[in-house]
Image (cartoon, rainbow, N blue to C red):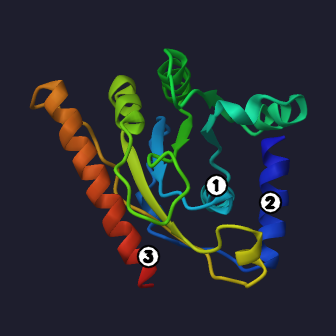
């Protein structure tokens, strides 16, 4: 189902303009699982992120509200998405991505937690998952259409990947998390500026 959906989405999106992908070589190639943390300004960036790394499959962390209706819940699960309660995150919000990463899968997270073009502090979810999974975070930034209105204006989509960020093991874990959080925040901001100027 994922492969069919990815190819269908790619065909549809390409009607409005092909995406330009920069620094894709930064994606790990060792077969181990990792986290992709991407900027988030609309529903279109979710689709383009998936297309840009295909045939790698992304398992998206999605808000639980998307799983409330039967048909949509079925579709979300077929597309490898799993629910998380953003207001009251439980053990499953860490347990599920840990299992996926341990199995060599890629987990996609939008750390801002909201769709906005403004710079917002990143939530700790991506760093917490990376720490418990002993996996790197690949930062990414997207610029382009955010909704259907933007698509029909043929805005050019672009996405850029940064170098993987690893949790330091030479300092206490709590401090290492703060360092990783700061590095992720700063790197995503720099990538956003970089891709905007391209």
Element type at marker 2?
A: helix
Q: How many marks?
A: 3
Is disc 1 surrounded by few (<14), some (14 to 19) or many (20+) residues within 10 Å?
A: some
Note whether residue 29 is visible: no
Q: CA distance from mark 3 to mark 1?
A: 17 Å
Note whether residue 8 is visible: yes
Quadrant location of residue 1?
top right
The residue where tag 1 is placed is 46
Q: Give me the residue at 33% from left, 64% from top.
A: 189
Q: CA distance from mark 2 to mark 3?
A: 23 Å
Sequence-wise first label, 3 or 1: 1
Image-based side of 9 in relation to 173, left or right: right
Q: CA distance from mark 2 to mark 1?
A: 11 Å
Q: Position of residue 90 (x, y in %)?
A: 50, 17
Image-based side of 181 in relation to 172, left or right: right
Element type at marker 3?
A: helix
Q: Position of residue 93 (x, y in %)?
A: 52, 23
Sequence-wise first label, 2 or 1: 2
Element type at marker 1?
A: helix
Which one is closest to the eye, mark 2 or mark 1?
Answer: 1
Q: Name the residue furthest front.
A: 87
Image-based side of 126 in relation to 3, left or right: left
Is disc 3 surrounded by few (<14), some (14 to 19) or many (20+) residues within 10 Å?
A: many
Q: Name the residue furthest left.
A: 171
The residue where tag 2 is placed is 9
Q: Give me the residue at 24% from left, 51% from top.
A: 183
Examine the rendered structure and indicate whether residue 12 appears above or below residue 58: below
Decide which of 15, 21 is in the foreground and name it.
Answer: 15
């Amino acid at each position: 189902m994922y492969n069919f959906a990815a190819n269908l989405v790619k065909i549809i999106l390409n009607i409005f303009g092909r995406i330009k992908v920069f620094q894709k070589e930064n994606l790990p190639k060792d077969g181990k699982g990792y986290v992709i943390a991407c900027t988030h300004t609309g529903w279109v960036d979710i689709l383009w992120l998936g297309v840009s790394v295909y045939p790698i499959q992304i398992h998206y962390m999605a808000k639980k509200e998307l799983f409330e209706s039967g048909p949509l819940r079925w579709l979300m699960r077929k597309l490898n998405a799993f629910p998380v309660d953003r207001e009251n995150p439980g053990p499953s919000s860490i347990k599920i991505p840990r299992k996926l990463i341990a199995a060599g899968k890629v987990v996609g997270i939008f750390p801002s937690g909201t769709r906005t073009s403004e710079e917002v502090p990143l939530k700790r979810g991506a760093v917490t998952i990376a720490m418990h999974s002993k996996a790197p975070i690949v930062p990414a930034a997207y610029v382009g259409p955010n909704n259907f209105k933007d698509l029909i204006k043929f805005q050019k989509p672009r996405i850029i990947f940064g170098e993987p960020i690893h949790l330091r093991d030479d300092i206490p874990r709590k401090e290492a998390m703060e360092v990783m959080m700061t590095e992720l925040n700063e790197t995503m901001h720099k990538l956003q500026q970089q891709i905007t100027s391209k």
